[in-house]
Image (spheres, rainbow, N blue to C red):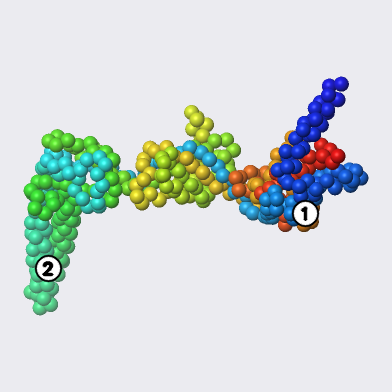
Amino acid sequence: MVALLAGLVVCGLGWMYRAPIMARLGPTAWEASRPVAEDPAEAASEPNVVTLDRAGQARIGLAFGEASIRPIILPVRAPGTVAFDERRVTRLRPRTQGRVVGLEVQPGDAVRAGQTLATLDAAGVLEARSGLDEARAALVETQATERVAETNLRRGQDLLKIGGVAQVEVDRRQVDLAKAHAAALSAQAKVDLYRAQYDRLAPEPGAGSSVSAIVAPIDGVVTNANLTLGEVVESERDAFTVADPSRVVVLANLYGADIARVKAGDTVTVQAPIPDHPRFEGQVRSVNAAVDPATNTAPARIEIANPDGLLRANMFVSVEIAADLGRSGVTVPAAALQQTEAGPIAFVRTAPDRFEKRSLILGVQRADWVEIRSGITVGESVATQGSFGLKAILLWALLGGAE
């Protein structure tokens, strides 16, 4: 009895709503659908077919697409965080101990390579200069000794030819020249050492002889300044951090199966949750092999060009990764898909006025297309826009629309 009552209710609903549905589709659609029910033998043999002429198709706005093979690209969405590229970040220390006498920049300032960030009054500069002068004097002395030893050797060799000196004397003078040459080389190495030390600490032109500068090695932005005027700082202490924001890293937190789907080289779109903020394009460089035990996610490293500096470190962003699954499949436009209680369906155009309902097994589903695992083959034409009208006509016919 319960089943009988349920059947009566369904039939009643179909009878009540047949007029509004077919009124929307129009009289042409109504007439086109009548043969499905007027001929009981045909309706029984083709219960999943809708016949609709061109006028009826135009009335319901029917459009078509074609099933085609394409690479299966799955959109993976994940939250992300912007960070500076660690390869473009430098931490600067004083080159020698000294007292801060000038502080030229503050956090947030843009700087150029070679720009002075701070100056120090450093005794180490004077020590390096004094050591360089002493090394140069020693070099001059050893070079003079070497020249004298070379002259003595030549004279001894000339005297040896006429028997003026013994061979042993010539040998001794040759040893003296070798010693003088070695002393000169040692003195030159010491000069080079002190010159490098002084050049590293040398003050800028016009500055005091004991002033040492902290200079930016790259173009970028000062993100941290750990100095105050007048304090004495050691060479082991970080004074400034300068980062180049023209190219940043986005760390996208991948979860579950997405960790295996995303691979290096996949294209990425990054969107900040700010009105009218532009989208940024980039690529996945790598996916971390370790999973964060607190969140059970693995970060994907994404490199983004950021020439205007709109993406800022520690900013939260939305990430969409086009994950290439490494295979191809049959796809149809997403508009061709219709949902029923039995599952997804689509209408395949088998003749100019004949449409066959197909039950589908789906794969990847996107906003623009869906993958068809079973139900449609490559090259078949499917109804897209207006396919809901075909579904309505078929439902009306199954409910016994013909009187």
Q: Nearer the viewer, residue 363 or 287?
A: 363
Hey, what amino acid is under mark 2?
Answer: Glu
Residue 28: x and y in percent read 76, 50
Between the residue at mark 2 and the residue at mark 1, the CA separation in whole angstroms equals 113 Å
Q: Is residue 277 left or right of residue 157?
A: right
Residue 102: x and y in percent read 13, 42
SS at mark 2? helix
Q: Residues within 10 Å of mark 2 (few under 14, many from 20)?
A: some
Residue drawn at the location 66% of the way across and 49% of the way down: 385
Q: Quadrant of the C terminus?
A: top right
Hey, what amino acid is under mark 1?
Answer: Asp
Q: Quadrant of the N terminus?
A: top right
Residue drawn at the location 63% of the way across and 48% of the way down: 369
Q: Which residue is mark 2?
A: 150
Q: Which residue is mark 1?
A: 53
Q: Is residue 98 left or right of residue 223?
A: left
SS at mark 1? loop
- Vertical relation: 33 (above or below) 229: below
